[in-house]
Amino acid sequence: MRFRTAISNVGLLHKISRSLAALARSCVIRLSPEQVHFIVPGNESSTGVQVWSQVKVTTLFDSYKIESNANNEIWLELHLDSLLKVLRSADSSVGSINETRNTASLTDSEVTLKLNKKGTQPIWAFEIRGYTASRKLMSITHEIPVKILSPKRQSELNEPLCPQPDIHVVLPTLLELRNIVSRLSHIADDVKVSANHEGKLELTAKSSRVNLTTTWKELQIPNSLANEDDQPSPPEDQMFTVSVAIKGFLKFLTSHLVGGTAIACICEDHCLIAYVYIGALNEAGGVLTFFIPAKMTDD
């Protein structure tokens, strides 16, 4: 098998990796000719939050070449801490678009990535090349070990089965949500997430002494996700609710780093599904999908 590419958007790959690292120590990356899939299965996440994401190759990479005997796909697993160290170095050296460049940043720089071997150990080899302020060519190499997944291990990784969502709603900005949920975490361990078809969203946290609800109104309800099973539509003011652990919800909200539109889907008493789009909704370069399990309460 062979894999080699230039990383055209180091900053975005760094942000995606930081979002995943908030949930788990390692992740699975499925490389295919058109898509890159980032997977955090439930057994890897301390909070039970799973991530099943796909990003267009062109969103992250350039001069992308992949070959394998398995439909030109490569599945691998790596430690996110190791990946973050490399991407932090690359992001600092290359400088992110629309951000102030570090004084140590290289000019005319590029970052390449390829799959190599050291003995019998597969590795991801990163090379950062560019010119210093004195126009001296500099090359920095980083290597991290990876594990190539067997077909058996690949077949064990399955996206969670969820019932048809009761409602979809476009969320407020994730950074705004994160700031509020962070405050709620001082009140309770769980938060109730409720929404209706009028575009109303509520977050409720309760303790023995406090009952606090934060409300948003007139949020967008995606038109393309209408009822498809010919069942009568519920009253627009009917609230649908799921309770989730605040700790897991906060870890999902680290995805505010990625930006873009986010849509929440409530499956009552089962889970909260959140789609975080990279870029504009109608022309997104990818989507990070988070499955946050429901937490049963005594209410």
Image (cartoon, rainbow, N blue to C red):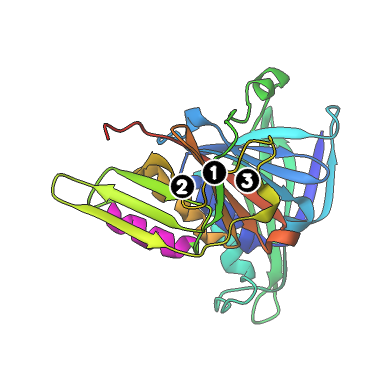
In contact (CB < 8 Å): disc 2 and disc 1: yes
**Residue type of the residue flagged with mark 2:** Gln
- Mark 1 element type: loop
Q: Name the residue under label 1.
A: 234
Q: Mark 2 points at which residue?
A: 238
Predominant SS of the magenta segment = helix
Indicate the position of residue 203 as horizontal and vertical percent values.
36, 53
Indicate the position of residue 5 as horizontal and vertical percent values.
78, 51
Residue at the image point whose x is 67% and y is 63% from the top: 279
Q: In this view, does 77 lie to the left or right of 208?
A: right
267 falls in the magenta region: no
- Mark 3 element type: strand
**Is residue 7 at all visible to an observer of this figure?**
no
Q: How many labels does the image show?
A: 3
**Of residues 82 and 74, the one drawn nearer to the viewer in this rendering:** 74
Indicate the position of residue 76 as horizontal and vertical percent values.
67, 34
Q: How far apart are marks 3 and 1 (CA)?
A: 55 Å
Q: In which quarter of the image is residue 108?
A: bottom right
Magenta segment boundaries in residue numbering: 174-184
176 falls in the magenta region: yes
Q: Name the residue under label 3.
A: 143
> Which comes before the other along the chain, label 3 or label 2?
3
Q: Distance between the residues labelled 2 and 1?
A: 7 Å
